[in-house]
Amino acid sequence: MRLNAYLARAGVASRRKADDLIKAGRVTVNGELGQLNTFVESRDRVEVDGTRVAKQPLAYLLLNKPGATVTTASDPQGRPTVVQLVPGEPRVVPVGRLDADTTGALLLTNDGELAHRLAHPRYGVDKTYVVELSRAPSDDQIEQLAAGVELDDGPTAPAQARRVTKNTIELTIHEGRNRQVKRMVEAIGHRVTRLHRSRYAGLSADDLEPGTWRELTADEVQRLRRGA
Ligand code: URA
């Protein structure tokens, strides 16, 4: 694998930051200065600032994200992050992003390749949200959400939408644009008062207490790989 991917799998840094370490001449492979295009295998000796680093096992965690947590590894404003809720070793990062006030299923992994594929619009991973609105939407408006609405970055793809209670709908989308659900709801003249992701790529975290996580089973990982 590429040296930056190896360093990411070793928990040293994200791939982008790993590139900076390589460019700064802080990484050696079998005693030679590593380059951006260096490929490494497990028998190679990789050192950062003279200390040996090694690839870590792949980890796949499903978190029931609580409200008031940000989906980044570190927040400049010092708010609590989802990464603080899971073990630091091996180092995992969130797949995609949920708004700070959104709750529910969030996958974290150090499998960069799978994370990249899951987050790629081409694979259209299903994301199901329970959406509470400030007022009851009409049946027509729910149908509009399903058919697609116009947003400032283009129309949304067909989705599944159904009413759950007077003010609550369930919406399944296959895209993952920034604040997509809230913007879709705004496009039909409503406002989201609560947003919960009940399923991500078929995985639900609703049986976990908010703020707790579990490892995916081998079967679940296989299914994600097949689906993406
Ligand atoms: N759509 C949103 O508007 N926010 C989220 O957190 C996820 C999807």
Image (cartoon, rainbow, N blue to C red):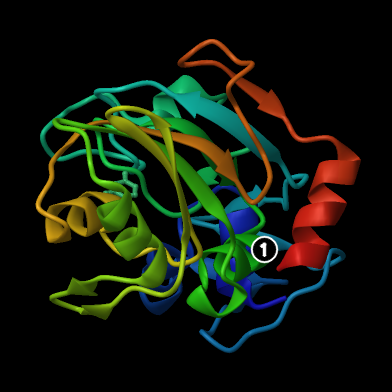
Q: Position of residue 228 (x, y in %)?
A: 71, 68
Q: Is residue 175 above or below residue 99?
A: below
Quarter where residue 187 is shown: bottom left
Residue 2 versus residue 33: which sits nearer the camera? Answer: 2
Q: Position of residue 170 (x, y in %)?
A: 45, 40
Amino acid beneath label 1: Leu
Left or right of 109, for residue 185:
left
Residue at disc 1, secondary structure: helix
Residue 92 versus residue 224: which sits nearer the camera? Answer: 224
Q: Quadrant of the N terminus?
A: bottom right
Q: Position of residue 212 (x, y in %)?
A: 54, 16
Residue, disc 1:
114
Q: How many marks?
A: 1
Left or right of 37, for residue 225:
right
Q: Name the residue: 54% across, 10% down.
A: 209
Residue 87 versus residue 102: which sits nearer the camera? Answer: 102
Q: Name the residue: 80% across, 68% down.
A: 44
Quarter where residue 73 is shown: top left
Q: Position of residue 31 (x, y in %)?
A: 66, 72
Q: Name the residue: 13% across, 76% down.
A: 152
Q: Name the residue: 64% across, 16% down.
A: 207
